[in-house]
Image: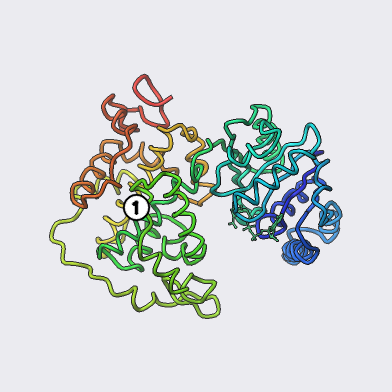
Amino acid sequence: MTQTIAVIGAGTMGAGIVQHAAQSGCSVLMYDLKDEFVQRGLGNIRSALQSRVDKGKMSADEMQAILGRIVTTTKRDDAASYDLIIEAAPENIDLKREIFADLGKKASATSILATNTSSLSITSIASASPHPERVVGMHFFNPAPVMPLVEVIAASQTSSDTVESVRSIAQAMGKTPVRASDTPGFIVNRVARPFYSEALKIVGDGSARISTVDAAMDAAGFRMGPFELMDFIGIDVNFAVTQSVYSAFFGEARYRPHPIQQRMVEANTLGRKTGQGFYSYTNGNKGEPALSQTISLEHKRTVPFVPEHLTQVFLSRGGIRIPDDRPELGEIIVRILVMIINEAAYALGEGVASVRDIDIAMKLGMNYPQGPLKWADEIGLDTVHAVLKSLMASLADQRYRPAPLLWQMLRSGATGDAVGEGFHTPGEKGMV
Ligand SMILES: NC(=O)c1ccc[n+]([C@@H]2O[C@H](COP(=O)([O-])OP(=O)(O)OC[C@H]3O[C@@H](n4cnc5c(N)ncnc54)[C@H](O)[C@@H]3O)[C@@H](O)[C@H]2O)c1
């Protein structure tokens, strides 16, 4: 690879991107405000590489060659001559706009400026630059050297040449790029919201305990249950993303944050990093759910929110088996999964990304066992729709409104694999 890359910010993401770019053969400049910050970033890169050497995954010579491709600076102007400048400074719109205004003026006439923002508007950041056509979103996932996905997001002003260049640079770096439109949460941070919010709602309405919800999603093939994952990410970080998406969609019910999460933040029980979150942690090992969280009403429902036969059809067509002695896991899986599928259908209907890119993004960005739209094809859009309707009726909450696209496909008979037409098998009736 011949590209030269400058990274603005040497924190978690910045250092990870620098490491990955240098590993893929690029000459990289790493900038931060103070030398101690740059040195901390470089130290983190060095120890990550050293651990690969110790495990026999890389030779000491390779490690030295990678480090030799990295230069550091505390002078931001040094970045101006690089082909691609990736900004990974804190998530603050004013700060990012100042960086893009300044570097947009000083960068060479062919430089591309990319932002790694998770939740801010690329269009707003681009408009600060005198050359917004060369500004783009390039959203890496944490840890950047390991996670294969990069969301490439065009601002309203971004040229197609810029998008294409960044897509091929990401590919040359060994990443899998997907295209997303400049909408709140892009693909992954939007479609993943129900994994957490429906789990919180299930616990909040007294339907199940935290450990039961996590056991359900484990049975469905997810690597971590929602509560374990929130503890891992940091409950404050997860809450901030939820709030940001909720407000960016002007209070849409599907993204409504849950008071349980707010209370956890107020109590400073933020997950692994504070030793106490939904579970308690000793020396990094997960223990029991926190006492107050184990007390669930588990109210004596005699009628399930989702009719039993629908739950059975949903699970069996979705290829999900639950242990015979844990029938209570079924409805939990159906509630969470159907909301992820619905969100993917909303995103598709609103032109956020293609069928293929939505499914790839959720598999590579979140390690989901299956793309939500592929799952919908297998389960059948008629079943997905029926589950949503019964949740809306029984829980009387607008968040369960089926996506208009689901209804349209249902009306045209494109209900998925059973009829040979669905999201992934476009036909006359299905998607294009
Ligand atoms: N952490 C994640 O999981 C993750 C994942 C994807 C995207 N992001 C996004 O990446 C960006 C960086 O996040 P992070 O987790 O690496 O944050 P971080 O706090 O670990 O690092 C931010 C770095 O930016 C530096 N900085 C502060 N002001 C600066 C300025 N004016 N110019 C240049 N550098 C400055 C800080 O010294 C720090 O080293 C954010 O926009 C975040 O939303 C984070």
Identity of the amino acid at label 1?
A: Ile
Q: Is 273 positioned to the left or the right of 288 in the image?
A: right
Q: Is residue 311 above or below residue 286?
A: above
Q: Is 266 positioned to the left or the right of 216 in the image?
A: right
Q: Estimate how packed mark 1 is, as few (under 14), some (14 to 19) or many (20 or more) residues with alpha carbons within 10 Å.
A: many
- Front residue of 308 and 276: 276
Horizontal and vertical percent for residue 97? 65, 45
- Front residue of 189 and 240: 240
Horizontal and vertical percent for residue 293? 34, 73
Horizontal and vertical percent for residue 231? 47, 67
The quadrant of the rendered image in which ligand 1 is seen is bottom right
**Residue appearing at x 59%, y 35% in the figure:** 155
* Image quarter (top left, top right, bottom left or bottom right) of the C terminus: top left
Residue located beneath label 1 in the image: 336
Horizontal and vertical percent for residue 392? 23, 46
**Residue appearing at x 28%, y 65% in the figure:** 208
For the rendered model, the colour scheme is: rainbow
Q: Residue 301 appears in which quarter of the rendering?
A: bottom left
Secondary element under disc 1, as helix, strand or loop, is helix
